[in-house]
Image: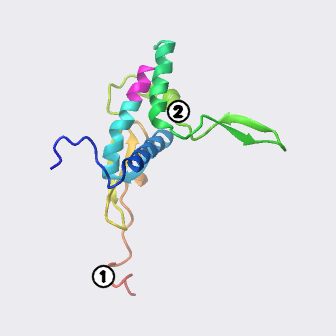
């Protein structure tokens, strides 16, 4: 029985499961939307919403200590092996230091949290988009609420040209 179980295990060891959730969370913060399976989206959604709420607490009106503390709390979860600054190969042997484009914490605090300053919660939505072709897993689009959804993004995949599968014998013959 699954009574009082806190999280789904995905059939993975704990370190791989944590890495999967961190990766999905980082992708969500970087790109505002991800396409994943329904079960994974349901597991990532509360994590992302808690991070946005934490970032909102450390926003414009907060003290310096609170801003620093909230950044550290978010950074503790989001980036385990992503550096904030990287060395970029410049002219010859000189290397410049620049902000890593894959570092999600500044984007969360500077772009995403101010967007939801007046919203008390519910920052994400899950839109079902169909089933994965290989194994039939239900696929969803997990995105932030105010992101522009085009009909192409949320549309179902195009219909197959003919019957497929065991008795369809591949593509329809003409």
The magenta-colored residue range is: 52-58
Res. 50 visible in picture: yes
Residue 64 picture location, percent across and down: 51, 13
Q: Does the stretch in magenta take in 55?
A: yes
User: Where 4 sits versus 59, above or below?
Assistant: below
User: Where 136 sits versus 109, above or below?
Assistant: below
Q: Quadrant of residue 90?
A: top right
**Residue in the image at 48% along x and 44% along y:** 27
Quarter of the figure that contains the C terminus: bottom left
Q: How is the image coloured?
A: rainbow
Q: Quadrant of residue 89?
A: top right
Dot 1 alpha-carbon crowd within 10 angstroms: few under 14, some 14 to 19, many 20 or more: few
Q: Which residue is mark 1?
A: 166
**Residue in the image at 45% along x and 23% along y:** 70
Where disc 2 sits, the SS reads helix
In-image side of 67 versus 6 (left or right)? right
User: Where 7 sits versus 55, above or below?
Assistant: below
């Amino acid at each position: 029985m699954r009574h009082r179980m806190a999280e789904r295990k995905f059939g993975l060891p704990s370190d791989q499961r944590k890495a999967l959730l961190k990766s999905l969370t980082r992708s969500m913060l970087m790109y505002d939307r991800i396409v994943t399976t329904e079960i994974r989206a349901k597991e990532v959604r509360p994590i992302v919403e808690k991070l946005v709420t934490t970032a909102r607490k450390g926003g414009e009106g907060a003290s310096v200590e609170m801003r620093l503390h909230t950044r550290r709390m978010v950074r503790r979860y989001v980036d385990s092996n992503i550096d904030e600054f990287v060395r970029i190969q410049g002219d010859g042997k000189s290397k410049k230091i620049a902000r890593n484009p894959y570092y999600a914490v500044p984007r969360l605090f500077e772009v995403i949290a101010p967007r939801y300053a007046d919203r008390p919660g519910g920052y994400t939505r899950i839109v079902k988009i169909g089933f994965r072709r290989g194994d039939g897993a239900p696929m969803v689009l997990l995105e932030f609420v105010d992101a522009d959804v085009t009909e192409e993004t949320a549309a179902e995949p195009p219909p197959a040209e003919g019957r497929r599968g065991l008795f369809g014998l591949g593509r329809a013959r003409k």
